[in-house]
Image: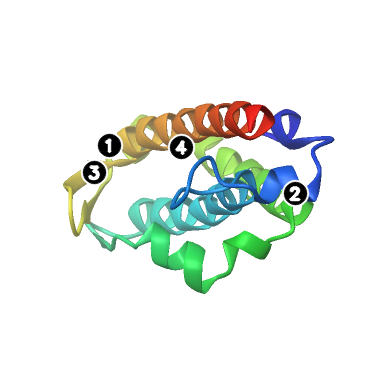
Amino acid sequence: MRARVTGLSDAVLSTPETEGKWSMRQVVRHLADSEIVWGWRLRLVLSEDRPRITGYDQDLWSARLRYDTADVEQSLQEFAILRRSHLGLLSAATEDDLRRVGVHSERGEESVGHMIKMYAGHDILHVRQLDRIRAAVAQG
């Protein structure tokens, strides 16, 4: 993620791919906040029996938490620190831990193992989005 935004001007980081879409700045902030959500969910499922996992509206978070003015470097640092913490938790997880489930308010049962795959896919989706935005903004 850092490699995709390093050296870019504030103007480029702040320009959305197209009208109504997110900028690179907003995507990076979203990934940092998603890591907070992931950590909370991971801790709930590892420590409680079948906890309820609530969804959230990422577009409301972006608007109301002012992702459009977020400090990109701070967002990158937060993401990195949180990710290290979560990987530490997962490195100590047993096979039984990976099978523990929470019940998502929209998607139903999700095991820790399944959540790992979902968040990995989420990362890939948004890294590709950063590449796409950069290409679109650079051409514009």
Q: Which residue is mark 2?
A: 11
- Judge left or right: residue 35 versus residue 111: right
Q: Cα distance, mark 4 to mark 3?
A: 16 Å
Q: Is residue 96 above or below residue 61?
A: above
The quarter of the image holding the C terminus is top right
Q: Who is closer to the viewer here, 135 or 47?
A: 135
Which type of secondary structure does the marked residue at label 3 adopt? strand
Q: Amino acid at mark 3?
A: Glu
What residue does disc 4 label? 93
Q: Amino acid at mark 4?
A: Ala
Q: Which of label 2 and label 3 is nearer to you? A: 2
Mark 2 lies on a secondary structure that is: helix
For the residue marked with disc 1, what is the amino acid?
A: Arg
Among numbered discs 2 and 3, the one appearing first in the sequence? 2
Residue shown at the point (61%, 61%) measured from the top left: 68
| Disc 2/disc 3 C-alpha distance (Å) | 39 Å
Query: Which residue sits at x=73%, y=36%?
Result: 5
Q: Alpha-carbon neighbours of circle 4 within 10 Å: few (<14), some, or many (≥20)? A: few
Q: CA distance from mark 4 to mark 1?
A: 10 Å
Dot label at residue 110: 3
Closer to the camera in the image, 78 or 66: 66
Sequence-wise first label, 4 or 1: 4
Residue 23 on image: x %, y % = 58, 47
Identify the mark nearer the N-term, 4 or 2.
Answer: 2
Residue 41: image quadrant is: bottom left
